[in-house]
Image (tube, rainbow, N blue to C red):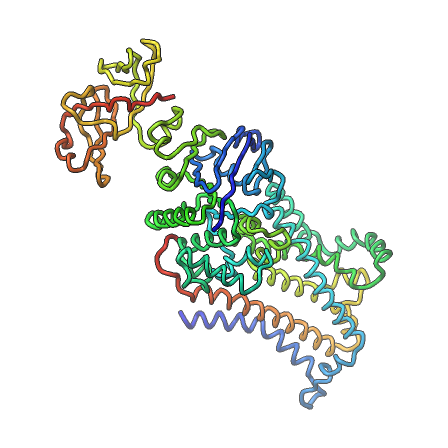
Amino acid sequence: MRAVRYSVLGVLGAFFLLPLVAMLDFSTRGAPGGGRDFTAWTSIADDRALLDAIAVSLQLSVLTSVLMLVLLLPTMVWVQLRLPKLKRLVEFLCLLPLVIPAVVLVVGIASLYSWVSYFLGNSALTLTFVYVVLVLPYAYRALESGLQAMDLRTLSEAARSLGAGWGTVMLRVVLPGVRAAVLSAALLTVALVLGEFTLASLLNFPTLQVAINLTGKRDAALSIAVSLAALLLAFGLLLVLSQLVGRRRTARVAEPLAPSGGKA
Amino acid sequence: MTTGAGVHLTSLSRSYSGVAALDGLDLLVEPGEFVSLLGPSGCGKTTALRILAGLETADSGRVLVGGRDITRVPANKRDMGMVFQAYSLFPNLTARDNVGFGLRLRKMSGAEERSRAGELLELVGLADQADKYPHQMSGGQQQRVALARALAIRQRVLLLDETLSALYAQVRVQLREQIRRIQTELAITTLFVTHDQEEALAISDRVGVMSRGRLEQLDSPGAVYQRPATPFVAEFIGVTNSFSGSVSGSDLLLADGARLPAAVLAEQPDGAPARVLVRPVDLHVAAEGQLAGTVLTHSFLGPVTRLAVRLANEDVVRVDVPSAAAAASPVGAMVRLAVEPGSAFLAA
């Protein structure tokens, strides 16, 4: 049984690791007969356009995560507490971007973006708005699972009866209760924004993926190095998240229940 | 020492999708009084409590606390402590921090907050659990912390919404006695919603029996049990035996010719159909009893044993006899039953 388990683990590990090893190999391959060459990796820091694109994508990740949470979490809480009949509609609207191809989406919003550019300028950061729409399905699912896991109604009513306004309820009761779900939603958002190419390219904004694509046309090794770095960054974030959530769960399981006193 | 405020609900009405949950409810709770609202599911007791807490809004009517109209005041400005049926401690906070939650919102200093939280945890007997998280405590302990949290803000009205329902029987009894002791000590006006009659009768100054969104009777536990104001209360509170027949003077004439003394029928016209209720404790096994029947079962209830007796008309009635005397009426024995004079209630 153990052999089967390790075999499955080995096959899966190879499935995921081999492309990464291949990317590392390609990006560090020197001249034929020579040793490893890390020029592609060191030249990342020298490519101004690439660094700018990385900065834009990171800013977009943060802005999209924040805007998504600010819009979606209070809406979901409000719908669950006050407008439960609208839950299906909100869910439908949030999942809709999943079935609309990015190309179709960009055709629809291209004219809208001329207005966005008119009012807010031509900054790539305006992509935040369309990215919020794009991450809705994933963020909704992550937050929904968190909200379902807590007794939102009772906890919010308890806080209200103790004198908390809605802002305090959100910040001190709901947010700590769905901390893991918020982290999951934020991570999915970061991963999605860092990897998004179609919308940025068609709307002509220089994000990381667009820059990688352009770089690939003149320096394949450099573009692969940047891609690998972006992937490792996303993995790193995932690892941090699972550690954070895992530690919390382990602490809960490890603590013994106090003796007697009724149903726990 | 906290002093409770009087609560006055006047003509409260609330309906959900056209169905009335409250239908002109009037309720007056004196300062420092412990009142329980009792009734079947859907009678409106929880709705009344939630409207008082500000968690629901009434369609019409007014809510007055300490003489002040708070009908339009939001829940977080009402200064009422509430303990819920579901465990409502904030899972990310320790017991001490849960108790201090309301104090922090009132800008109390850290030292004061810790001291007050410790004081309250001491009061509910959980000083040694102050640093535990909710998931590390039992259900009974969590409800006691929730009680301490509700009391910490020195509110003048305490609301208990089926607080003991999720607990085991033994813990329920302990906790209800503790709640009553603390309530008496602090003189907090308390409104307790429950569907458990024994619980309501055991710890309340007065019990309000509700049906279809209205208060049927609001009286002391003894009066509600012994002098029910309406047929609904008579049938809802405690266990009763039902007898149907026709009025004959101040007796109920049963179909088999037996006569049951029922003073409540004195005002009714002779020959009119009627139904009366008699509690098991008001039926006695007696040689000269008016009713004859066969003992079917014995149920030992501690100081009394409840006999199930099948009467000549096939109806089965329950009779409480002292456990020491139960052996005199074994299963299968023919017995005669007498009704305690003046004990019969008129049924609906």
- Residue B40 found in image quarter: top left
Q: Is residue A247 above or below residue A100?
A: below
Q: Is residue A1 above or below residue B319?
A: below
Name the residue at 41% across, 32% down.
B219
Q: Is residue B214 above or below residue B148?
A: above
Q: Is residue B96 visible?
A: yes
Position in image of residue A111 (x %, y %): 83, 52
Position in image of residue A25 (x %, y %): 65, 81
- Please identify the residue farthest to the bottom as the structure is shown: A34
- Residue B208 found in image quarter: top left
Q: Is residue A142 visible?
A: no
Front-most of residues A104 and B74: B74
From the viewer's perspective, tell me whether residue B84 is left or right of residue A172.
Answer: left
Front-most of residues A149 and B197: B197
Name the residue at 19% across, 30% down.
B296
Front-most of residues A85 and A138: A85
Name the residue at 20% across, 23% down.
B338
Position in image of residue B186 (x %, y %): 45, 49
Front-most of residues B182 and A134: B182
From the viewer's perspective, tell me whether residue A113 is left or right of residue A70.
Answer: right
